Image (cartoon, grey):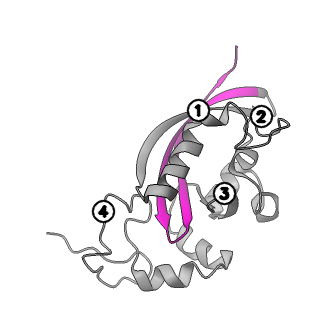
Amino acid sequence: MKRRICVRCKKQLLPQEDLRTEKVITQGICSRCTVQLTQGIPQNFRELLNIIPEPVLVLDCRGVVKTANDCGMKFLGKNPGEIEGCLGGEVLGCAFANLPEGCGKTEHCRTCAIRNIVMDTLTRGRGYSNVPAFQNIKTPRGERIMRFYISTEKIADRILLRIDDILERATA
């Protein structure tokens, strides 16, 4: 069996830390590094996140974006000040996020695959890998239906949301 190591400090993971099904994004991080990275300082998260080549957002238990890796900032076309403290749907440009009820509270939110997967990961601690999710997104070219492939992982009380792939088409 292949020995697995922490992606941050490179020490061998203990058996209880090597939960392959739950560590779909980081592929494993030891308890010590998890504590250090979840001290609430977004800069520490970026250290880990920038190891990951795909766009990754860090969300809290309310779906509020705490930070993102550099690839995520580039993908969103935004800087940290434009995303940190905003709800996930607002950051991604969800067409329903600006309705009077707000992101997470409209009738559309109940069927939002991204929101449901993030909240399930938060509640049950289960990570997901490469799950398709459709979302109506506002773009400079008008509203588009975007097909995201997403993965999630829970680290302490935070959720990592990785955008694995995205396809776009115009709405009818």
Q: Earlier in the sequence, mark 1 or mark 4?
A: 4
Find out whether residue 150 is within the magenta segment: yes
Q: Amino acid at mark 4?
A: Arg
Q: Which residues are magenta?
A: 143-172
Report the side of 43 relative to 15 (left or right): right
SS at circle 1: helix
What separation in Å lies between label 2 and label 4 (alpha carbons)?
36 Å
Q: Nearer the viewer, residue 154 or 91?
A: 154
Residue 163 visible, this orientation: no
Foreground disc of the pair 2, 4: 4
Q: Amino acid at mark 1?
A: Thr
Foreground disc of the pair 3, 2: 3
Q: What's the mark number on residue 20?
A: 4
Q: Nearer the viewer, residue 45 or 120?
A: 120
Q: Circle 2 sits on which residue?
A: 139
Q: Amino acid at mark 2?
A: Thr
What separation in Å lies between label 3 and label 2 (alpha carbons)?
25 Å
What separation in Å lies between label 4 and label 3 (alpha carbons)?
26 Å
